[in-house]
Amino acid sequence: MATKYEEIQVGERLIRVSNPDRLYFPQRGLTKLDVVGYFVTVGTGLLRAAGERPTTLERWPSGVFEGAKLSTRQDNRGDAFYQKRIPRGAPDWIETARISFPSGRHADEVCPTEEAVFAWAANLGTLTFHPWPVRRGNVDHPDELRIDLDPQPGTDFSDAVAVAGELRGLLDELGWTGYPKTSGGRGVHVYVAIEPRWTFTEVRRGLIALARELERRMPDRVTVNWWKEERGEKVFVDYNQMARDRTIASAYSIRPNPHATVSAPITWDELPAVTPRDFDVTTMPARFAELGDPHAGMAASPYSIDVLLEWADRDERQGDGDKPYPPEYPKMPGEPKRVQPSKAKRN
């Protein structure tokens, strides 16, 4: 008979884990208790990545079984879902941050302030934490520029790594330090700490300019085209990850795949030699114990994005203005027609 619950101490908190023997990753034989234990071992790194940030919880309460799917806006009957508001019944020590959506509505999201938050959330089935690129004291001004290198069909992780190498050179020219991590899937994420002086709209505009510069340097390998039919076999720089209410899986988050891979902070020197499968729930704890968090110093040196906004002004003068927002967003000032090119031609 399965144990009804177990209790683990995390800092000053005693976290009760219900159904600890439930298989969360059947292919790996990993239980719910294994998942909670993993988050305890990497808690300091995860708190560095998500601490004081409004955070959406990606919950898989029945684990990652064959055929399991994540609910979407179009189909909310999935086995997993995104929790943007603090769950009912949360203990009073779970703190929140109030954020506003593009629609004008608002929500009080979980805002981690201590490592025990992650163990508590894991007991609810949370595998992936999606922190906003803001701190709760200044929720309208991002303090991280997040560059998502997303391989399109016909490309893979090695292509994202090649593009990341060129991006590193570009950041070096700016005098900036970027911090890479695996997405836990096929992509690469690169973070840059920025001063929290600009709005989401301004930071997104700066990221579009940076992405266009990267595309100019690698036109055969990089695309900034929003519409999938125009991307080709290239790596897409997803500039809309800097739009309000768009988030990226945090460092040390578990990804919902059969291998239980995790989003792993790494160094630039490591990047060419690793694969996403190198980092999972079973291997990351030993790595973390030995090396600590490679991104620990990221917030110490924030940069100005003035140069990116100057590039954006230059591009606009040359006819390259704003790019489309995601479909659920209201029409934004200066945004081009949000119509798929093939449909626009037919019309």
Image (cartoon, helix red, strand yellow):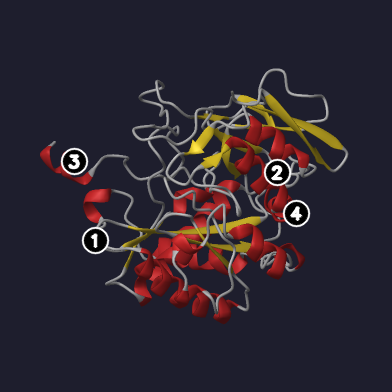
What residue type is disc 3 on?
A: Ala
Q: CA distance from mark 2 to mark 3?
A: 40 Å
Residue that label 4 marks: 44
Q: Secondary structure at mark 4?
A: helix
Q: Residues within 10 Å of mark 2 (few under 14, many from 20)?
A: many
The nearer-to-camera label among 4 and 1 is 4
Residue that label 2 marks: 53
The nearer-to-camera label among 4 and 2 is 4
Q: Residue, x 35% and y 45% (percent of image)?
A: 336
Q: CA distance from mark 4 to mark 1?
A: 37 Å
Badge 1 or badge 3: first in the primary sequence: 1
Q: CA distance from mark 1 to mark 3?
A: 26 Å
Q: CA distance from mark 1 to mark 2?
A: 35 Å
Which disc is residue 344 wearing?
3
Q: Secondary structure at mark 1?
A: loop
What residue type is disc 1 on?
A: Gly
The nearer-to-camera label among 1 and 3 is 1
Badge 4 or badge 1: first in the primary sequence: 4
Q: Residue, x 71% and y 60% (percent of image)?
A: 195
What residue type is disc 4 on?
A: Thr
Which disc is residue 154 wearing?
1
Badge 4 or badge 3: first in the primary sequence: 4
